[in-house]
Image (cartoon, rainbow, N blue to C red):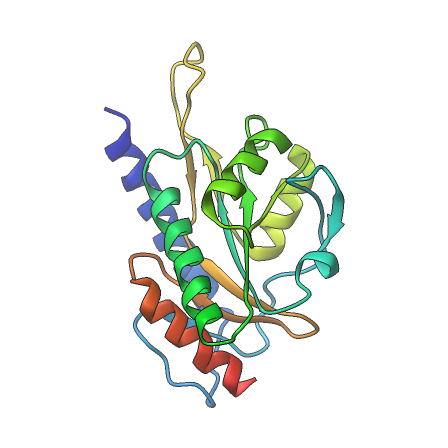
Amino acid sequence: MQKPFLVIGVLVIAVIAVSAVMLTLRADPKIALSDAMMNVDGADIGGPFTLVDQAGATVTDTDVIDKPTLVYFGYTFCPDVCPIDVQVMVDAVDILTEKGIDVKPVFITVDPARDTVAELSAYAEAMSPKMVALTGSDDQIAAVAKEYRAIYRKAATDESVAEYLMQHTVFTYLMLPGKGLAAIFRNGFPPEQIAGDVERVLKAN
């Protein structure tokens, strides 16, 4: 009964976030826009962070973004939206790998209370051997979400229900080491299109 509420909530947050982000972005004239992407030039999105990876190691943004990197904010208990979006991300990475293009998929939880190191380890192993999955304290997650302008909140629910839902934005960010944000991808597009757009952006950079 709660899943439709989650999807609607995610879409509402995504629309609000798109409007906020679009005010800060301008098209990069070197890259033709596709319907899946908002490419950017000098946008103030992304920044330093300190989090914990699925091996329990403390890592920083420079440790994680050491090559072209796709970043997605979600949570492992998500029943529908996140699994699809993350699968698209890792499938796009696999397509790029076949072309000799090395891109790292990164998953940052918005639900650190439940997404422990053990949960993220199992999740990353199931999704992709290349995946880096990150968690942290409430303050650390809030800080990295603020850097990426990612919005999230716990959905209203009976406090006695342990399996609560999280509402969150559903963008995938392409980050480049030393350069920062290169593109933002909307969800709902096939991995082949995401991979093609990533390849075009990387060639332009």
- Seen at 66% across and 62% down, the residue is 65
Residue nearest the viewer, comparing 128 with 156: 128
- Total labels: the figure holds 0
Answer whether residue 36 is visible to the viewer in this image: no
Q: Quadrant of residue 182?
A: bottom right
Vertical placement of residue 168 versus 63, above or below = above
Percent coordinates x, y for residue 179 in the rendering = 66, 75
- Seen at 38% across and 70% down, the residue is 37
Vertical placement of residue 98 versus 109, above or below = below
> As drawn, is 111 to the left or to the right of 35?
right
Q: Quadrant of the C terminus?
A: bottom right
Percent coordinates x, y for residue 158 in the rendering = 39, 14
Residue nearest the viewer, comparing 70 with 26: 70
> As drawn, is 202 to the left or to the right of 197?
right
- Seen at 42% across and 20% down, the residue is 163
Q: Quadrant of residue 32?
A: bottom left
Vertical placement of residue 137 versus 168, above or below = above
Percent coordinates x, y for residue 172 in the rendering = 46, 59
Answer whether residue 128 is visible to the viewer in this image: yes
Q: Quadrant of the N terminus?
A: top left
Vertical placement of residue 193 versus 32, above or below = above
